[in-house]
Amino acid sequence: MSAATLPEWLSRLSEESPESAALRHKRRGVWTTWDFKRLALAAEHFAFALRRLGVGPGSVVSILSESRPEWLAADLGVHLAGCVSHGIHPTWSAAATMQALDLARSEVVVVEDAAQLRKLEPLLAAGSLRRVVLLDERDVAGTAGCSVVSWASFAGFGSEFAREHGPSLRAHRVSAGDTAWLLESTTHPDALPLRPVSQAQALESIAAAASLARTRRGQSVLSFAPLAHAGERALVYAALAAGTVVHFAEQPATVLNDLQDVQPHWVHAPARFWEKQMSRIEAQAFLAPPWARSALRRALASPQPRGLSRLTARNIRRKLGLVRSPFVISSGGCCSTEVLGWYAALGVRIEEAYIEPQEGAHAGDAERELAASCAIADALVFEGVAGHRAALLRPEREFLLAWAQERQVPFTRFEDLLTSPAVGELLQSEVERANARLPEGARVHAFRLIPTELAADDEALSGSLRLRRDVVAQRHADLLEQMEGEDEKAAKAAGEAAAEVLRGLRSKAAGDAPR
């Protein structure tokens, strides 16, 4: 389907297949369906409401929400009004969100619920925003101001304006060179400036996503990565253009159940997600009967499972929601060879769509190998004295809990495990295992556990749930200093040992010399 702009793209879709299912969203356990006509109408009403508000071409409208149909309707409505769409990662802290809105100079913000609305309280108090559109009105009593309106009220505002002024509003022209999106870093707004993406570039990214996903009519896909992520947005639009029905997870906590329910033909998620699912299955295996563990090992050991091993592999794929997925799409970092091989043994190919740059010549290799461990959620490697490398490890909560229960390691809270000698020995063995797969110049010489559990909205985590190097290094400078001291001692001891060997050689040479 050829189109020069996103408004033209939407117009053609809604004209060609107005009553075809486009989006499905689970709310309170029930799937609701949006056809293309409903999506286009919601986008138009949003655009008309912006016009009535006086928000014109070039103005920035930000969207702060998990993935859902209204996110896309708002995004498309922004383009219909000639404005610029700016997605903000819903897991960012209030401070990061405020910074992003300030840098984008947003005039209108679409927020999901009371929790996201609270991040805007300083702007609401200062009257800095022209309007805040709230998607979910529950639990907002006492927090909303006169500038906050519900999605339904804002849509009604636009619908009324359209009736009053007629079809002349639709004559606003958007050109291929106009800015469509303002893109943030997937990690944090520190990595600025914001990158403008034109209408033409947005459509090019959708075409590239279509080529990657090879999506087609009649398929289903589940979207749960934030639509603020440009790759997820492009993939969703590519699916819609091909006639694939896009399902949105009810909420982050229900993603696994929703995957099992939909069994999508393909799905996109950060690399961290695929690592975590592997860890989850491995953790469940710890608590399973011996015969089940053995079946899992046999299924994963064979590149082409047969008989019972094939049945086991299919059951695992069903648990993962990947029975109909010959491949999945990964972004936001590289998956290790171990993770790639684990999924390949199940008959699922991981295709990496985007690889974030890594710091340090060998840091990225070591970090990937460490994160491949079922016991390690993520790792950051720092270069120290004389080439010594120190790692800060974020443990994999679900795996450690199952491992501790199976081995009867005493603990009351998860934090107790972080100081357990048994867990220290486990992670030491995992670091040694990772080092065995690395060249000498990339191996880790010391490590520490990050001593607290990190919530999804912690500033130490990026939008793709990876550790942020700058925040972690600042927050745990004491741990890095401890390891640096160990590096200095190790370097000094190594130097003294080398000097002692050299003295011995010289002494021997002097004794052997002819007199």
Image (cartoon, rainbow, N blue to C red):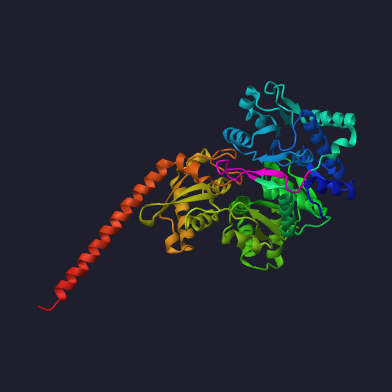
Q: Position of residue 75 (x, y in %)?
A: 75, 41
| The N terminus - image quarter | bottom right
**Residue 175 on the magenta segment:** yes
Q: Residue at (68%, 56%) from the top-left corner? A: 329
Q: Residue at (75%, 26%) from the top-left corner? A: 149
Q: Position of residue 182 (x, y in %)?
A: 66, 43
Q: Residue at (29%, 54%) from the top-left corner? A: 492
Q: Residue at (51%, 46%) from the top-left corner? A: 394
- Nearer to the camera, 515 or 238: 238
Q: Is residue 221 above or below residue 51?
A: below
Q: Position of residue 196 (x, y in %)?
A: 66, 45
Task: Name the image quarter holding residue 66.
Answer: top right
Magenta region's main secondary structure?
Answer: loop
Q: Residue furthest left?
A: 515
Q: Is residue 90 above or below residue 356?
A: above
- Nearer to the camera, 107 or 100: 107
Viewer can see residue 443: yes
Q: From the viewer's perspective, tell me whether residue 405 is left or right of residue 27.
A: left
Viewer can see residue 244: no
Q: From the viewer's perspective, tell me whether residue 357 is left or right of residue 114.
A: left
Q: Residue furthest bottom?
A: 514
| The C terminus - image quarter | bottom left
Number of marks in the rendered image: 0
- Nearer to the camera, 432 or 176: 176
Task: Name the image quarter holding residue 162.
Answer: top right
- Nearer to the camera, 328 or 130: 130
Q: Position of residue 6 (x, y in %)?
A: 78, 47
**Residue 484 on the magenta segment:** no
Q: Which residues are magenta?
A: 174-195
